[in-house]
Amino acid sequence: MKHSAIVRGIAVLTAIIGLALVAQPVSAQVKLGYVNSETILKELPEAKEAQQKLETIVKGWQDELEKMSKDLQAKYEDYQKKSAMWTEAAKQAEQKKLIDQEQKVNQYRTDKFGQQGELAMQREKMMTPIREKILRTIEVVAKDQQVSFMFDKAGDVLLLYADKSADYTYEVLNRLIKDLKSEAKPAKPAGKK
């Protein structure tokens, strides 16, 4: 999520909470809760698996980038050793090759690791369904616990105080794991106990 969207979200959330607190009758209680999404993502098996897949992909790209960089460095060192014996035209031709190869290395780095690169796309592709599932589960837990507002302690929302009894991180995580286990169980054949 981009910084400006987070700031807008915080402003809207603050306004909503303020209105809710003012609009509530004295006897009604607004219940607040929070989760730590970093903890959920670190401990949720699906998220761990996605992170391991990403790390495997990244390792391959890093190895290729290192190989390309070493090759470029070796060619540059070779150029420095031999260029004194070359004609000006030969030097320029070799310099152009080195510049072209350096541009290819930089382009590869940008294509794989840049802001709009393959890593960002793969992360979004793998993590979006997991984040959506977490958000749905947070909503279920909030409704079960009759929580009016749920904050993310890991986000940019400043949380100055948090009573541990309002922490629903592990309730959300446990429900996600329970749902994952129930999804993994094979269906029992009809007519058998």
Image (spheres, rainbow, N blue to C red):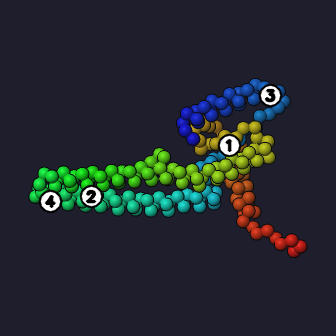
Q: Secondary structure at mark 2?
A: helix
Q: Is residue 158 left or right of residue 175?
A: left
Quadrant the N terminus occupies: top right
Marks 1 and 2 close (CB-CB < 8 Å)? no
Marks 4 and 1 close (CB-CB < 8 Å)? no
Q: Looking at the picture, which amino acid does disc 3 mark? A: Gln
Q: Nearer the viewer, mark 1 or mark 2?
A: 2
Q: Nearer the viewer, mark 2 or mark 4?
A: 4
State how far apart marks 2 and 4 are (Cα). 14 Å
Q: Is residue 83 left or right of residue 44?
A: left
Q: Does residue 74 lie above or below 92 as drawn?
A: below
Q: Looking at the picture, which amino acid does disc 2 mark? A: Gln
In the image, 25 versus 84, the foreground residue is 84
Disc 3 marks which residue?
24
Which sits earlier in the primary sequence, circle 3 or circle 2? Answer: 3
State how far apart marks 4 and 3 are (Cα). 82 Å
In the image, 33 versus 181, the foreground residue is 181
> Which numbered circle lies on residue 151?
none
Q: Residue at x 62, y 42 (%)?
A: 153
Q: Looking at the picture, which amino acid does disc 1 mark? A: Tyr
> Which numbered circle lies on residue 82?
4
Disc 2 marks which residue?
73
Q: Does residue 148 lie above or below 185 as drawn?
A: above
Q: Position of residue 97 (x, y in %)?
A: 25, 54
Q: Secondary structure at mark 3?
A: loop
Q: Position of residue 168 (x, y in %)?
A: 70, 47
